[in-house]
Image (spheres, rainbow, N blue to C red):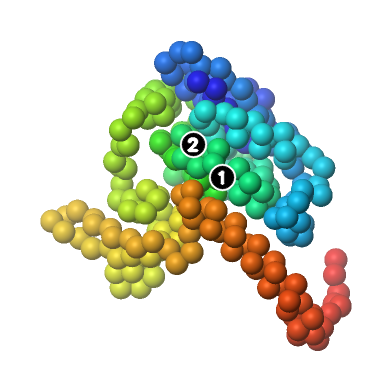
Amino acid sequence: MELLGIVASPRKMGNCELIVKAIAEKLPPPVRLRIVRLAGKEIRPCKACYRCLSGDCPLQDDFGTVLEAIVSADALIVAAPTYLRGPNSSLQRFLDRGLQFWKHVDALDGKPALAVAVAGVRDGEGHALLGVENFLHGMGMNVKGRAVIRAALPGEALLLEEAISSGAALAEALVDPVPRPAASPSCTECGGTYFEFRGGDRVYCLLCGAGGSVRLEDGRVLLRTVPPAHSWRGDASMHGHGEWLREMRERYLRERTRLREAALRYAGGEFI
Ligand SMILES: Cc1cc2nc3c(=O)[nH]c(=O)nc-3n(C[C@H](O)[C@H](O)[C@H](O)COP(=O)(O)O)c2cc1C
């Protein structure tokens, strides 16, 4: 297996890097692990020019090299440290350039992956794991296992019993041919376990945008979700979304004079 570890931490030999290596070690051989230290890569902010829809991205940096490594891997492990209750920002910086993913749908869709968030504080992870899963879902991957691992000091992930057993369970999940049921109620569309309550019994999946309802039956939480109005999960939807984006670009070109006129009233301002 050609395994790619994406370490979204600036710490060398920190918990994220060590967890990725420890999980890889538990996989059935032969495994070749290559690692991208994403936080150390130069990934420039997307300029929203949409040029990538018809040609190449004008930004010259490490994005292409990292995407190429992701595309050619058989499976991925992404590990990010929690910073201020979210994942390290290197994940989002990469994801922001994601309009370029449509060119690689066939290679990315359904690729098996693991999502790991490391948190130094108990219950301190906030939306860090959601961010890691969103990173993988954004590329259409199949998140086969997910975990928050508690570890604060660099190296602690190798010493704490809870972290060690999470790592072993994740390794098993990555190669398990049978999809495992989620431990908590999950979205019937994408398997996500993060929801916003929208009044009454209505819920909204934060990972795929599915809407649905929730109710209690015999003490069990029952969730029913319906596909989101606009999805880009799955091969067909990803291709469809790429087409939709190209149509939006055409629409912009047709309507830009009217749009500019509307915006003109608010031109200028005091910027810092
Ligand atoms: C700037 C900064 C902010 C952090 N914020 C949080 C936090 O909100 N919640 C938490 O549980 N841990 C937080 N931590 C702790 C790290 O998530 C923890 O030390 C983790 O093990 C780091 O992983 P690494 O060794 O791979 O870098 C923070 C660490 C730093 C440096």
Residue 152 in sight in this render? no
The secondary structure type at the circle numbered 1 is: helix
Residue identifier under label 1: 105
The quarter holding residue 197 reads: bottom left
CA neighbours of label 1 inside 10 A, class few (<14), some (14 to 19), many (20+): many
Q: Is residue 195 visible?
A: yes
Give the side of residue 139 with respect to residue 263, left or right: left
With respect to residue 55, does 161 lie above or below? above
Compared with residue 58, is residue 18 higher up or lower down, i.e. above or below? above
Other-residue count near label 2 (Cα within 10 Å), few / some / many at <14 / 14–19 / ≥20 = many
Residue lying furthest top: 29
Q: Secondary structure at mark 2?
A: loop
Residue 95 placement (x, y as % from top left): 63, 48
- Closer to the chain start, of discs 1 and 2, is 1
Q: Residue at x 41, y 35 (%)?
A: 145
Mark 2 — residue?
111
- The structure residue drawn at horizontal position 49% and vertical position 55%, both measured from the top left corner, is 237
Q: CA distance from mark 1 to mark 2?
A: 10 Å
Q: In the picture shown, does residue 221 fall above or below 248? A: above
Ligand 1: give its quadrant: top right
Which three-letter amino acid code belongs to the residue tagged 1? Val
The percent position of residue 63, horizontal first and vertical second, equals: 72, 40
Choose between 229 and 88: the one closer to the eye.
Answer: 229
